[in-house]
Image (cartoon, rainbow, N blue to C red):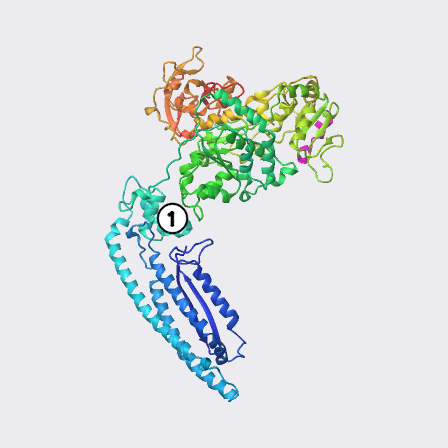
Amino acid sequence: MPKCASFCLVVFRVARGQHLVVELSLSYRGGPPGPGAQPPSFHSPLLPSLMHSFVKHLCSRYVVEHQGTMALPALLTRLLPLRRLFVLGIGFFTLCFLMTSLGGQFSARRLGDSPFTIRTEVMGGPESRGVLRKMSDLLELMVKRMDALARLENSSELHRAGGDLHFPADRMPPGAGLMERIQAIAQNVSDIAVKVDQILRHGLLLHSKVSEGRRDQCEAPSDPKFPDCSGKVEWMRARWTSDPCYAFFGVDGTECSFLIYLSEVEWFCPPLPWRNQTAAQRAPKPLPKVQAVFRSNLSHLLDLMGGGKESLIFMKKRTKRLMAQWALAARRLAQKLGATQRDQKQILVHIGFLTEESGDVFSPRVLKGGPLGEMVQWADILTALYVLGHGLRVTVSLKELQSNLGVPPGRGSCPLTMPLPFDLIYTDYHGLQQMKQHMGLSFKKYRCRIRVIDTFGTEPAYNHEEYATLHGYRTNWGYWNLNPKQFMTMFPHTPDNSFMGFVSEELNETEKRLIKGGKASNMAVVYGKEASIWKGKEKFLGILNKYMEIHGTVYYESQRPPEVPAFVKNHGLLPQPEFQQLLRKAKLFIGFGFPYEGPAPLEAIANGCIFLQSRFSPPHSSLNHEFFRGKPTSREVFSQHPYAENFIGKPHVWTVDYNNSEEFEAAIKAIMRTQVDPYLPYEYTCEGMLERIHAYIQHQDFCIAPGPALPEAHAPQSPFVLAPNATHLEWARNTSLAPGSWPPAHALRAWLAVPGRACTDTCLDHGLICEPSFFPFLNSQDAFLKLQVPCDSTESEMNHLYPAFAQPGQECYLQKEPLLFSCAGSNTKYRRLCPCRDFRKGQVALCQGCL
């Protein structure tokens, strides 16, 4: 990154006695200026452009090249009347040279720096002296040649004109005044060269003395508290030019600049004692805390969401349609919370999959039947955060993200230019990758504030980089070393993660009665807007057609998709309100196995439909199904919509084997006889989502370093007692609660799983939810002993299945790495020790005492 122009010079020279050539020579130290580079404040940024314009004007008007047909004397004679412009140009560029040359010396020192941070080389010194001498020599040569040529041209012109042509008195000696002025300029340049040489020599002498006096203070210190300092200095010596951001922070290749950067911008070296520590450590004062207040008017939110993309237009329409429901939910939750104090958080929402850099494959497909689940969820997340009263910033481009984070210019190697101004950041995997690429070391510092919206979940074995690499769990989407609770899912299928969810439209009692009375007993709607979903389903559709009128909403442009049978009434792609009206008339909403876990089945159930879906045997997973391959989860999916099957079930949800025609047809007949009311789980209402996100913001703090998973020798005694029926452990009543624990520790119930059973399933078997934040309480031999499990030996290792008991051998294994505590995973060799908790009715993410 160039610091300044070392010199700027206009050279008029005669080349081979034929043509007059004008050259503009701009030499930059350190290479050509990068895009967006700004000149140092010492120089006028107009000088280079003025020089360029002047020379361009001079060349275009007065430099004539006729392939050797015009004699040089005649050309010079034409230029002589322009002597004033010429002399002005010589004087102007001499001044320009002096400013840029001398400016290069003084720009080496920046205001606020120590006097001992002067660069080790004086920029432009030798070049400047040499150029000044060259200018003087050239000007003297020009005087001699132009004087001779002018005399030759004058005599020739006078001889041809005879006595018929008379010049005005002020133009008779066309070259005399010009020669005198050029001689004066040459003498001045020569004098200036001597003076500049004296200044530069003095500066070098002074700098040499300063360097000798402070050399010991610009050496990498040997401090055991900063073991990486010397190695980082070595790296900076070799690679500081690899990213312009280092120069942006003042690195210039000197040892002092390396140490200043590594101690004040990064944190690998100790502070330098001779630096102004007050200035170096100055940070903006935190803003006074403001209490969050529920909002009901969403007009400002719609402005924050922006526009221009079909995806954003879809999201804004959804927000507008549900505005009244959000306002009602806010009033209800405000009454429930009472006088609870809620600090307003500053929140950045970066929707990475909508950025051009990630491809934005969703926006072009919004109007063509593409998946809308992600946009439904993001619209609801934005609305919930805004309604809860928090400060919100929304970005859907990389440029906006960089601006809001304070990313320095360069390639992303350096930290942010300012402390992160946001308490929380909600993003997705695309946004997470973008932040890692552009935040430098700040990503590691602030990643505890990030929440990742992750539809299908990320299990701990895939999240831990070292473990995933060693044990074959590494995928394109995992290995982030976050707390697994920072990943937030669409459905509560992975208790290792946090359940974010979305909202389905809630009906009032009047609407429910109208829907129930207007249902058609023999009308079915197929779940699938893309024609590919219908391919190969003729057998099922044929059976269904015997009993029901089948409707579809398959996208097409001009011709009916051939995959959709002729007996199906296809409405094409419908806007959301019209699709809702279709569901309110239908009896059955039927899925054909894909898409997985979308919002549409919940919307259908909320509008009084029965949802019929396929049971998968064997279950789909990353091991046997292309859709899940590469996703950071080993979860087995036993149906198209596991949440609907496990948390709602009959009579609203029927899961059957589609490969068994008799079972499928029997289910159709039974459904036609079944009457259901519209049903929506509380956790998918506006109030339920507000309640859940409020609890997360209030209680989840991943910036507090987790306690180590202590080996047995250092583990505290377990605060549990064996339940009266001797089946599980409970929190002892006379034991104080763990401070800062959320969910509250008294909600914990510990069970020993049967061999080959995951903790997720073990807790569900007992009507509970696995809670990974309770694992540290169980990670001790005492917990096994209280469950009457004898441990002949106890070892502590990194394994996502631990703590666990192995048979045969009577071996107990404890967890060594806190990030690997996992509800997911099983092995027939182990009986896992599982932490479970209760949950609020209709809100599995929260325990009874969590709100």
Residue at the far front in the pictured view: 169
Name the residue that disc number 1 marks.
Answer: 249
Q: Is residue 94 above or below residue 702?
A: below
Instruction: Give the residue drawn at x 45%, y 84%.
Output: 152
Residue 456 place in picture, x, y as percent: 54, 31
Magenta region, residue range: 530-543
Position of 119 with respect to 745 (left or right) is left
**Pick the front one: 32 or 400:** 400
Magenta stretch, main secondary structure class: helix
Q: How many marks are shown on the rendered structure?
A: 1
Determine whether, in the image, residue 808 is placed left or right of residue 631.
left
Which corner quadrant of the image does residue 228 belong to?
A: top left
Q: Is residue 263 magenta?
A: no
Question: Percent x, y for residue 274?
Answer: 26, 47
Q: Nearer the viewer, residue 162 or 439?
A: 162
| Residue occupying image coordinates x 65% and y 38% | 367
Question: Which residue is the extreme one toward the top?
Answer: 724
From what the image shows, is residue 442 above or below residue 527?
below
Name the amino acid, label 1: Phe
Residue 361 location (% of width, % of height) = 59, 41
Identify whether 43 is placed above or below 567: below
Quadrant for the N terminus in the image: bottom left
The quarter holding residue 616 reads: top right
Q: Is residue 331 visible?
A: yes
**Residue 476 appears in the picture as rendered:** no
* Residue 65 position in % (x across, y down): 53, 74
